[in-house]
Image (tube, rainbow, N blue to C red):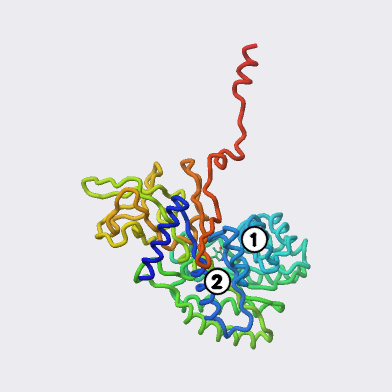
């Protein structure tokens, strides 16, 4: 029953703001945040850093700041964006992959916690700035990801410093006099198996023991949320029970109360997001009924890039009889959101809702085909707020310099 009310609201928003449109529900974000903090309530010092890259609208970042979260960033631009919310730079962690020493130095100057994921930059940074404490990203070589593009813990992954190179890290620390204040891992998106995750955490505890001044251990993220009915999701409550107990034990072994950190993106925002697109054309071919929406992989690339499933409902006709559709976009390239999907009967101009569209959806959108980026709306305390206007042609032309071809032609004529 509640879902229908939600659908009516979403339809109203699509009518009010036009389509395509992203809508984010802050209630859902808050409940996911609370689920995670509750699961680890027996840990004395817990810190959750929201992974900005999942959904980076500054109002979302501000909402997290108000919840008390920190922010996890992967580029200097994400750091700068985060700082516009007025958050304390100490609550930001910067976990880039393969960026230049110069960028790392610039971020360090802003007072942000640095996390370094390769030996050569670690050594250079340590030589130049031994007084700035850094965290190191370790690759425990545990295969935990659900998709090869987003699994980052395996043996030939480009992420992190291999667990086999810890002796080398220690040598760098000795030679430079730098201080390692945190140990980090991020084994990749989509953790299915708690035991696999716990095995990786044991590896991190072993590494942490080898450094004297650890303030925190950051276990990254990769928590899986259900995208369709029957999907397995990470049992956060169970993980919380098991890891909290083990973490508290570790603090006693280590002889110091250290902070347990996570940096989830998808878990916190995926289910809070809905993507609304209008059906332009219903095309019946001999074998298939296509529903063409006013969007494409320019606005939602996950189905094409990762083969991700996004549940799709027809919010204009929620009680209609189910039929089978291929939902496709308007991009001049194959852009299939879903094949052979059962959806309540679709008519042209109906609004379809793509569920779980909070994480890695708007943040990966582009202007391909010179289409405008969708508008974004935040639904907060029963009210809707436009948090990003739809683009106009000015945005597409912005930064393009115009050459005056006629000037040269006239010169040649003379
Ligand atoms: C992307 C990323 C995350 C967030 O991953 P989710 O699967 O969205 O929770 C966390 N940490 C790092 C270093 C990342 O690159």
Indicate which label's residue lies in the foreground, 1 or 2: 1
Q: Residues within 10 Å of mark 1 (few under 14, many from 20)?
A: many
Closer to the N terminus: mark 1 or mark 2? 1
Residue 218 occupies which quadrant of the picture? Answer: bottom right
Could you say which is closer to the camera, residue 28 or residue 172? 28
Whole-percent x, y for residue 209 in the image = 65, 80
How much space separates mark 1 and mark 2, taking CA atoms?
29 Å
* Residue 395 appears anywhere in the view: yes
Q: Are marks 1 and 2 in contact (CB under 8 Å)?
A: no
Q: Residue at x 47, y 43 (%)?
A: 371
Whole-percent x, y for residue 194 in the image = 46, 77
Whole-percent x, y for residue 277 in the image = 40, 52
- Residue 305 lies, with reference to residue 253, above or below; the image says above
- Residue 379 lies, with reference to residue 411, above or below; the image says below
Q: Residues within 10 Å of mark 2 (few under 14, many from 20)?
A: many
Q: Residue at x 63, y 62 (%)?
A: 118
In the visual, does 237 lie left or right of 101? Answer: left
Q: Residue at x 64, y 63 (%)?
A: 94
Helix, strand or loop status at disc 1? helix
* Figure quadrant of the C terminus: top right
Residue position for label 1: 82
* Residue 188 appears anywhere in the view: no
Helix, strand or loop status at disc 2? loop
In the visual, does 233 lie left or right of 407? Answer: left
Residue position for label 2: 140
Whole-percent x, y for residue 391 in the image = 53, 46
């Amino acid at each position: 029953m509640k879902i229908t009310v939600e659908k009516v609201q979403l339809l109203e928003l699509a009518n009010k703001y036009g389509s395509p449109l992203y809508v984010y529900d802050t209630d859902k974000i808050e409940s996911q945040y609370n689920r995670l903090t509750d699961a680890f309530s027996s840990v004395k010092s817990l810190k959750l850093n929201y992974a900005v890259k999942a959904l980076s609208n500054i109002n979302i970042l501000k909402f997290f700041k108000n919840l008390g979260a920190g922010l996890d960033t992967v580029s200097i631009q994400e750091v700068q964006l985060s700082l516009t919310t007025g958050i304390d730079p100490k609550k930001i962690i910067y976990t880039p992959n393969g960026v230049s020493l110069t960028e790392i130095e610039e971020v360090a100057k802003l007072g942000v916690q640095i996390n370094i994921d390769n030996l050569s930059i670690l050594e250079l940074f340590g030589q130049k700035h031994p007084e700035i404490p850094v965290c190191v990203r370790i690759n425990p070589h545990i295969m935990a990801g659900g998709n090869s593009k987003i699994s980052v813990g395996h043996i030939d992954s480009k992420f992190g410093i291999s667990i086999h190179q810890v002796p080398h890290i220690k040598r760098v620390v000795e030679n430079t006099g730098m201080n390692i204040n945190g140990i980090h891992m991020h084994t990749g998106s989509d953790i299915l198996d708690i035991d696999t995750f716990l095995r990786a955490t044991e590896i991190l505890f072993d590494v942490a023991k080898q450094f004297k001044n650890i303030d925190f251990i950051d276990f990254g993220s990769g928590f899986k949320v259900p995208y369709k009915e029957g999907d397995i999701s990470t049992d956060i409550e169970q993980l919380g029970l098991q890891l909290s107990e083990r973490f508290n034990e570790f603090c006693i072994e280590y002889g110091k109360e250290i902070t347990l950190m996570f940096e989830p993106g998808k878990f916190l925002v995926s289910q809070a997001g809905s993507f609304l697109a209008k059906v332009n054309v219903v095309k019946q071919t001999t074998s298939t009924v296509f529903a063409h929406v006013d969007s494409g992989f320019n606005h939602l690339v996950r189905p094409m890039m990762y083969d991700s499933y996004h549940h799709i409902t027809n919010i204009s006709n929620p009680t209609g009889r189910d039929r089978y559709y291929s939902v496709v976009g308007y991009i001049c390239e194959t852009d299939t959101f879903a094949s052979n999907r059962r959806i309540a009967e679709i008519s042209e101009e109906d609004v379809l809702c793509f569920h779980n569209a909070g994480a890695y959806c708007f943040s990966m959108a582009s202007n391909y085909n010179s289409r405008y980026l969708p508008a974004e709306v935040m639904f907060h305390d029963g009210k809707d707020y436009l948090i990003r206007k739809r683009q106009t042609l000015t945005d597409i032309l912005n930064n393009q310099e115009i050459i005056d071809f006629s000037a040269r032609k006239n010169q040649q004529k003379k």
